[in-house]
């Protein structure tokens, strides 16, 4: 996922994006997703 975002926002490489993210946010993109992802919704489930 970080690779796609890095390209979309204009970073030269995914590594540059991850390094900048960590310096600004204080954690890696992967660790951030683990903490802040919403509940997992199973395929086919309908959101209320």
Image: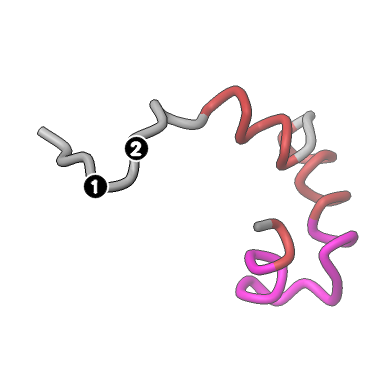
- Number of numbered markers: 2
- Residue at which label 2 appears: 42
Mark 2, Cα crowd under 10 Å, few <14 / some 14-19 / many 20+, is few
* Front residue (pair 21, 38): 38
Q: Main secondary structure of the magenta part?
A: helix
Where in the figure is residue 47, as x and y percent of width and height? 16, 38
Q: Name the quarter where the C terminus is drawn.
A: top left
Question: In front here: 44 or 21?
Answer: 44
Q: Quadrant of the N terminus?
A: bottom right
Q: Residue furthest top?
A: 35
In the picture of the structure, the residue carrying the numbered disc 1 is 44
Q: Is residue 10 left or right of residue 22?
A: left
**Relative to 24, is 36 above or below?**
above
Residue sitting at x 88%, y 61%: 16
Q: Which mark is residue 15?
A: none
Near-viewer residue (23 or 45): 45
Q: Residues within 10 Å of mark 1 (few under 14, many from 20)?
A: few
Q: Position of residue 19 (x, y in %)?
A: 88, 49
Q: Are marks 2 and 1 in contact (CB under 8 Å)?
A: yes
The percent position of residue 39, horizontal first and vertical second, equals: 39, 26
Residue 14 among those drawn in magenta: yes
Looking at this rendering, what residue extends furthest in the left direction?
A: 48
Which residues lie in the magenta part? 4-17
Residue beneath the point at 53% across and 27% down: 36
Q: CA distance from mark 2 to mark 1?
A: 6 Å
Residue 40 image point, x, y percent: 41, 31
Report if residue 21 lies within the magenta region: no
Does dot 1 land on a helix, a strand or a loop?
Answer: loop
Query: Does residue 42 appear to the left or right of 37 in the view shown?
Result: left
Residue drawn at x 60%, y 23% is 35
């Amino acid at each position: 996922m970080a690779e796609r975002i890095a390209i979309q926002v204009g970073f030269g490489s995914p590594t540059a994006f991850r390094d900048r993210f960590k310096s600004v946010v204080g954690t890696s993109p992967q660790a951030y997703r683990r903490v802040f992802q919403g509940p997992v919704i199973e395929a086919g489930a309908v959101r209320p």
